Image (cartoon, rainbow, N blue to C red):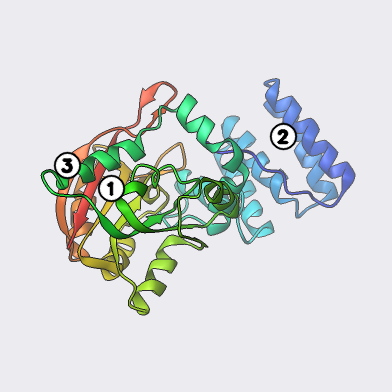
Amino acid sequence: MQQPIHLSSGNLIADRRFEWARDREARGDLAGAADLLMQALELAPQFASAWFALGGLREGLGDRDGAIVAFEQARAADPEDRHGATLRLIRLGCLPIASMPQGYVRTLFDGYARSFEKALNEGLNYRAPDLLFRAVETVHAGRRMKFGSVLDLGCGTGLAALPFRPFSDWMVGVDLSSGMLAQARRKGLYDRLIESEAVAFLADEAKIGARYHLMLAADVLVYLDNLDPALKVVAQALASPGQIAFSVETHNGDDIILQETLRYAHPAAHVRAAVAAAGLKLVSLDSASTRTEKGVPVPGLIVVAGH
């Protein structure tokens, strides 16, 4: 899903060399591309996009130390870290697991908003909305399923909200990306849409006493490392009774890992512990894949928890 971005250096010649470098890279000439990027950086030393691209090329050429230097320079040149250099440094083992830069997440999804649904549905066999709906439906088997207020965390274009809208009196969507919110607005599913980081929004809602009967988080927590802080504020803003249904990617190890896809994978044990630490009751936890990558199902978990 990650799309390359180009933040202009402000120097036309440097920008041109950057584009030539991208062309060389596409043709498989990594060394030639790296040389062109160095030329661009001589003209514009604070050219964040060139530093980031150079880091990727050096990594591809087996120059780990050089890649680290380049990614560190990219991060210094762009304090928002819109390219996600921090994540590449984590992958290289020189930074600990940490929260993703908001600038990176916002830029990623703003750039992806218009093609988001087509890519998920046609290329990745995306199933998270359906899986979450089935999980919640199973919990309510034999009972009327109706929610007074629903909060869709990281709502994106509204895919997760779609199956739940007929069962919801009031639906709120929150997302960090204005581009995603613009797409969601066109669907007319939400009574309220807010541009905000999800955990910060939840904390603010809890402070004013807002309570939601159902929260959804479809492929949102994959962009968080430790789930404890998020689930604790979920618990504070969740009505009693109330539930949260969410998906995560997982693996068989014991630790939270940042995958090659630059999404976090959470072991089932961590999910269970985070749910318990938040004071929530685990209702269901099922293994399921919400998408495929390169034709291979990505291991995942579908979780329902609540008061």
Residue 281 placement: quadrant: bottom left
Q: Mark 1: few, some, or many residues within 10 Å (few <14, many ≥20)? A: some
Residue 301, placed above or below residue 292: below
Residue 73 appears left or right of 149: right
Secondary structure of the residue carrying tag 3 is helix
Instruction: Farthest residue to the bottom: give it.
Output: 208
What amino acid type is highlighted by mark number 1? Asp
Label annotation for residue 255: 1
Residue holding disc 3: 138
Label 1–label 3 contact, CB within 8 A: no
Q: Mark 3: few, some, or many residues within 10 Å (few <14, many ≥20)? A: few
First along the sequence among labels 2 and 3: 2
Viewer-nearest residue: 138 or 188:
188
Please provide percent x and percent y for residue 11: 87, 49
Please provide percent x and percent y for residue 260: 45, 36
Distance from disc 1 to disc 3, alpha carbons, whole Å, reads: 30 Å
Distance from disc 2 to disc 1, alpha carbons, whole Å, reads: 35 Å
Tell me what residue is drawn at x 23 percent, y 37 percent. Answer: 252
Viewer-nearest residue: 2 or 160:
160
Residue 129 placement: quadrant: top left
Residue holding disc 2: 34
What amino acid type is highlighted by mark number 3? Thr
Please provide percent x and percent y for residue 296: 37, 23
Residue 76 placement: quadrant: bottom right
Residue 68, placed above or below residue 237: above
What amino acid type is highlighted by mark number 2? Ala
